[in-house]
Each structure stands twice: as C-alpha cells, then as structure tokens.
Image: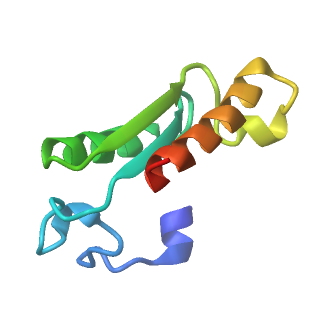
Amino acid sequence: MFVELYKPDPHSPLWDPFIHPDGMADVSKAYFQVAGLDPLRDEAALYERALRKEGVPTKLDLYAGYGHMFWTNYPELEASKKFVEDTLEGMKWLLGR
C-alpha cells in the first residue's frame, strides 16, 4: 500500500541504498532500533549487516516480540522505557560522546 502511494523510482539509490553507485563504504556510522515484529524488521537488519560488512560502524538494538511504534503506543512498558534510554545512548554513540 505504501509503495503504491509513494511510487518510488526503483532505480534510484534514494529508494534503494543497495544500488548506490558509490557503494556503502563511505556511509557514516549508523544506529538502528528494530522492533522484532515490525514490518520493516528484515530490511533494517539486512541494511545494518551490509553496512557492517563494508566496515561502517553500526549499533543495533533489537526489541524482540514488539511491534512498530510500541514505545509510543505503550509507554508504560519496561521495553518502552528501555527504548527511550537506548535512543539517548545511541545518539551519544553517533555523536561520539
């Protein structure tokens, strides 16, 4: 449904970073927070792995058993509180602090 509405150019590296003509080696370090039941879980895991294989520093936090936006839909969960803490730590890591 989303792709139908968005109508991306399938040949654009803005849509598919795997086809960027310069590859991925010069991509900045990346932080991923992935919910285990998220529809985009596999794409995030594959992209993180591809970056890591190219030598890009990555950090991945996986929240097994939770769905997309669980931290906003259920902020009282311990996993949601951990997500917020991890977000702060992930941003510190990205900024080198």
Q: Is residue 21 above or below residue 57?
A: below
Q: Residue at x 12, y 72 (%)?
A: 22
Q: Is residue 50 above or below residue 19?
A: above
Residue that extends furthest to the right in the rendered view of this protein: 76
Q: Position of residue 4 (x, y in %)?
A: 50, 70
Model colouring: rainbow
User: Is residue 52 in view from this perspective?
Assistant: yes
Q: Position of residue 90 (x, y in %)?
A: 53, 42
User: Is residue 42 in view from this perspective?
Assistant: no
Q: Residue at x 70, y 42 (%)?
A: 69
The reply, left or right, for residue 89 in relation to residue 42 is right
Number of numbered discs: 0
Q: Residue at x 11, y 75 (%)?
A: 21
The reply, left or right, for residue 57 in relation to residue 85 is left
The reply, left or right, for residue 81 in relation to residue 45 is right
User: Which is more toward the observer, 91 or 73?
Assistant: 91
The quadrant in which the N terminus is found is bottom right
User: Which is more toward the observer, 89 or 78?
Assistant: 89
Q: Position of residue 89 (x, y in %)?
A: 57, 38
Residue that extends furthest to the front in the rendered view of this protein: 97
Q: Residue at x 37, y 45 (%)?
A: 43
